[in-house]
Image: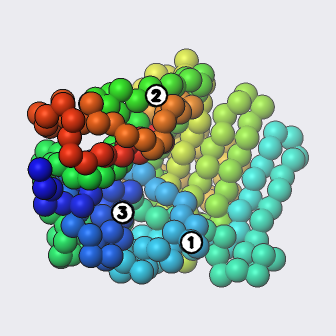
Amino acid sequence: MSASHDICIRGAGIVGRTLALLLARERLRVALVAPPADPASGHGDVRAYALSPAARKLLEGLRCWPPERAATPVLAMEVHGDGDGAVQFSATAQGVPALNWIVDVPALERLLAEAVNYQSGIDVVTAPVAAPLTVVCEGRASATRAELGVAFETTRYPQHAIATRLDCERPHGQVARQWFTAEGDIVAFLPLDGAQGRQVAVVWSVRSERLADLQALDDAAFAARLFDLSGGVLGALAQTGPRASWPLLLARATRWVGPCLAARAKALRWPATPPTPCTRWPARA
């Protein structure tokens, strides 16, 4: 049984689309499994990633690096502990143009989706297809991982993360700031909206039993809590995005690569001994 695709990638997030573009550039025929487009996709998504120089170089090679307002260079980092403990890092001291870049996730996803649509060699499909190699890029909630029988162990930490966006009275100065409190909270302000920006992405790690009370606060009261935790370093704060939350987990797959003939044959209704092997690469959560 011949396959019309060299590789089937299950999952069309940032990892799956980037891999598809890289493989298509090598003239491989790629099937990218993605659900139908959601017109509301990206609306209300407050995620932001800290990407390294290596990640920037890779995405620039694909012409998918966002403009500066969506990929703000971090020139310094300040980490504050309880009491007077603090540590600082500087791009100047390291002799680099930036420590990393804080990238708006929806902006990056849009660029990758557009690139996939224009790239020959990639077929976007809604269901898995036969291919000599299957790559799983579905993340923590992977259905394929369960289908292939890959054990995925999770350890739940006693914390949840809350994420949102804030507008600040003062410019962030391209500084990423983090505070560790005596109560066990960890708050990060990540600079957004370019070099002169006044917006930050917030990630606030709290003990799980406190999550409901914090999520019940109105926007003004929530911003006031963050003002207090940050010592007012950026002046008055206003919440400008929705709040998202998720549990913090340690997740490990027992296998990263290997043959999966029996499970694959069953999934695709192949004969008991399919003609070509496939490989499973469960994605780390």
Q: Tell me which residue sits at (42%, 62%) in the image.
A: 104
At numbered mark 1, what does the secondary structure look like: helix, strand or loop? helix
Q: Earlier in the sequence, mark 2 or mark 3?
A: 3
Give the distance between the C-alpha atoms of the residues marked 2 and 3, in whole angstroms: 23 Å
**Relative height, residue 236 to residue 116 (above, below):** above
Q: Earlier in the sequence, mark 2 or mark 1?
A: 1
Q: Tell me which residue sits at (76%, 71%) in the image.
A: 90
Give the distance between the C-alpha atoms of the residues marked 2 and 1, in whole angstroms: 29 Å
Q: Nearer the viewer, mark 1 or mark 3?
A: 3
Amino acid type of disc 1?
Ala
Q: Tell me which residue sits at (55%, 18%) in the image.
A: 209
Q: Tell me which residue sits at (26%, 57%) in the image.
A: 7
Local crowd at mark 3 within 10 Å, few (<14), some, or many (≥20)?
some
Local crowd at mark 2 within 10 Å, few (<14), some, or many (≥20)?
some
Disc number at residue 19? 3
Label 1: which residue?
A: 54
**Relative height, residue 162 to residue 213 (above, below):** below
Horizontally, residue 165 falls left or right of residue 43, namely right
Q: Position of residue 249 (x, y in %)?
A: 54, 30
Label 2: which residue?
A: 152
